[in-house]
Image: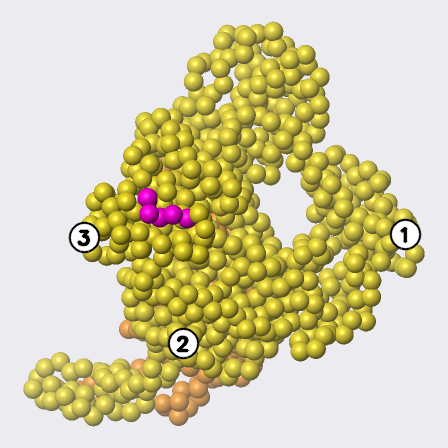
Amino acid sequence: MEGHALPPEEHFITVEPYYEPTGDEIAVFEAAYRNRLPVLLKGPTGCGKTRFMEHMAWRLKRPLITVSCHDDLTASDLVGRYLITADQTVWVDGPLARAVRAGGICYLDEVVEARKDTTVVIHPLADDRRMLPMEKLGLELEASPEFMLAISYNPGYQSVLKELKQSTRQRFVALEFDYPAAPLEQKIVVKETGLDEARAAQLVKLAAMTRNLKGSGLDEGASTRLLVHAGKLMMDGIPPAAACRGAIARALTDEPEMLAAVDELIATIF
Amino acid sequence: MNSSPPSSDVQLSAAELEEQLDELLEAAFTPGRRTNAIAKKLAAHPAEVQRFVLHWCAVTAQTHSQVAYLFARHVLEALETMDRPDVQKWLLHAMDLYDRQGLYPAIAVLKAPKDFAGAGVDHAQGVYLEEITGVLELFLRGLSGRAMKLEPADPPHTDTSTLFLPSRLGRFPAKDDNFRLYKALAVHQWAQTHFGTFFPDLAAELRAYPDPDKARKLYHLLETLRLDAVLARHYPGLAREILSLRGEALPAEFQDAAAELEAPGAGPKQSLEWMENLLAQPLPPPWPYMGELLPERAEAERQQRLRRDKAALQAALAHMQPGAKPASFSLRRENSANEVAADFVLLADGRPVVLDDEVKGLLHSIDLDLGDIPPDYLTPAGGGGYAPAGNPKEKEMAPPEGGYAYNEWDHQRRHYRKNWCTLRELPSGLGDAGYAAEVLGRYGGQVGQIRRVFEALRGEEKLLRAQKNGDDVDLDAAIAARTDLRCGREMTDRVFTRQERLERNIAVLFMVDMSGSTRGWINDAERESLLLMCEGLEKLGDRYAIYGFSGMTRIRCEIFPIKTFAEPYGPEVQRRIAGIEPKDYTRMGAAIRHLTAKLKEVDARTRLLVTLSDGKPDDFNDPYRGVYGIEDTRMALIEAKRAGIHPFCITIDQEARDYLPHMYGAVNYTIVSEVRQLPIKVANIYRKLTT
């Protein structure tokens, strides 16, 4: 947790993070920001949600505070807590409270992973009250006008306990993300890795094949992020098939049969 | 546990063996089954072999005792020519035949173990289709984006719907090479259907030549040149492998043809032209991955598909007539930007009607096969009425006594048919008392593992001490921290206690497919899955119930309670699980509605309805087969979701998977392609689903 408690002003992004828009998501996000509406990003892992947030934070010139949610994350991890020091207790703001005070963008990544009590703090912040209740201090923190809340969520998870409740999701402007179309994905791979067009196209073709297997034994197909990993390995001199086996096949699954099938698909291309 | 094979290393005597075999094979109740001679011969073999034979007899007997008996009679003969893993493959091959084609083909294989052994050059390095079907299916699905059906048959060929491959390949001395040949055979056939080898008049064109057989073979060879070049452009690695399997190089006369056919843009018509030019030349020997080109089979399949499509289209049109009077339909082709998939506008008496996906799909399928839609395809089916033949007065039929009445969704009417299905709860049959113990013994290690994993999931109300934050001060920890501080040591900040709430509040209902199509391995796998699940769930503490469903027609939907929520798990439930047997058909909608009502009565935060099934909804001689059934099932699932129930489907469907996301939603189903993995998979899926 301490990692997130850096002063928010250090989270300003000064160099433009590379992002290729796939639709009107930048305009919608900016409009939501102007109107102080919170945003929900939906989409599979590795399709560019976090990169988009970095890009938007740079564009809007606000600090970005990212919290990766996990199943032990409680409301006090977000709001803050008393720490005991030498002879006294000291209040330390959590990442959400810091963002609320400093007018930053707080991004709760994979919000369904967090404990259910986090909704207590998310709900009043996400509607027109824009308040953060700080129970332990007995006060409510009013969000500064520049503050924005964004959460992300992967609807592809097959768990009945990890669904976003209607009462939560209906507070947000939702942006749907998916893997980019082939030409765009190829461009992204080229830009991120420095690979030549032809080999980037091969990686994109392989990704499409693995995405065909979603639901037949794979939970997800290869994400754009995995393609970038494979591309980087290839640029570093690893033979293409070995790079794909390491960065894509083995990252996707442990099942021997599925591994064999994906390896065969890799062999068709390289 | 009487029926289990002995676990000791002691060699058994003929009498002991006979007793065990008699029991396994039900010899006492079946005239003509004599185990005496088998036992005598088996007694001369070491304990290891005896155990092997008894074990597989026991496994096989659960599916069919006659198959098990034949196995026992011929296994020793088989062991003379094959090693044990190959004998096992021989038996599994026979069992699969039994599942797929019935008893007689299975008997034929069991009676002739020598033929099976002699099928390959070197059976130690041979590859069986069964071994690699899983990988190959996934591979083809990845390659083509849709499910391809694989069936064993010789010679290898395709009828444009299914890829037929030999059940075993032993051509090369190395296993890898044999697998590569399988892959090449499959890809070559897929490429034929995908890149236009079977154009509509192919069979007729080839028949017109004086030597149609040679014409066919030559055309196949030329098409292979063209397809390999297409593959090389798209999948260089794959093409390299395929080219390495080519035998002799082609004679010089073929070089010009090769150059033209391998250029981008070449089509099947060019192959046909070159075939005419080269017909005088002697035919070069075929390459091993080519299999056979059977345009007649493809044509027959196409005709069948057309007949099916035509009947389905006419039936659909009958329901789409705007008034009571028969309407006349016509089509207008919209010239869309892409020439591959033309858009159609259907006019009923000159006025456009809305097309649903079913009709659209039919029109495209017919258009692909024929290049146009002939007018006679647009004549609505006779009568134009609603009632399927044989049920003239169905609207007035009231639910018979003692049944539950359920609505059914008619997707074409966009309305419910009121009280359409009659469902009864029937007592389920009791199976063998020893079955559960036998299964749990067989899965010994895995049962333990499932229990442990499920136990770890169990959340309990407990007070967590020494937490970083919490509701109260942990006095012990606080004092220790203060002491540490006074002594100059680093103090901890973990000085709170926190009450951890019981997180799991889940009720799950398993709905088990008892339709006739589950006969064989699938039924075994379902029963084993349920027993393993029960063991796990007992540890976990989630409330659960199990119901089987089957039925025939809408007035005979049947539900068999195996275990209700209130009932404890015990020998009675185990015997009912053992007694689950294939019955009739799968009218899923009514079953889902009935079980949804059951689940609604249970007070739980999360309610799950898990379906174990082997395919899509289906009923006897009824429009329920096809889109109607899928739509009704989908509607029943939507009703369940509205009631706050999470439906999930675990299916062993090998073929059409495309309807599953439509029925269950993109993430609410999973496909287990290998039946034998089902028992372990179900527990894993449940664990993933509820954490």
Callout 2: chain:
B
On screen, residue B541 above or below A67: below
Q: CA distance from mark 3 to mark 1?
A: 80 Å
Displayed quadrant of residue B279: top right
On screen, residue B402 above or below B6: below
Check disc 1: other Cα within 10 Å, few if <14, some if 14-19, many if 20+: some
Report the colour scheme: by chain
Check disc 2: other Cα within 10 Å, few if <14, some if 14-19, many if 20+: some
- Residue at image mark 1: B327
Q: Secondary structure at mark 3?
A: loop
On screen, residue B534 above or below B466: above
Choose mark 2 or mark 1, whichever is in front.
Answer: 2
Report the amino acid beneath label 3.
Val
- Badges 3 and 1, same chain: yes
User: What letter labels the chain drawn in yellow?
Assistant: B
The quadrant in which the C terminus of chain A is found is: top left
Q: Nearer the viewer, residue B438 or B354?
A: B438
Q: Is residue B654 visible?
A: yes
Choose mark 2 or mark 3, whichever is in front.
Answer: 3
State which tag comes first along the sequence, 2 or 1: 1
- Residue at image mark 3: B10
Magenta-colored span: B33-38
Residue B371 magenta-drawn? Answer: no
> In the image, what residue occupies the spot 45% across and 51% down?
B31
Marks 2 and 3: CB-CB under 8 Å? Answer: no
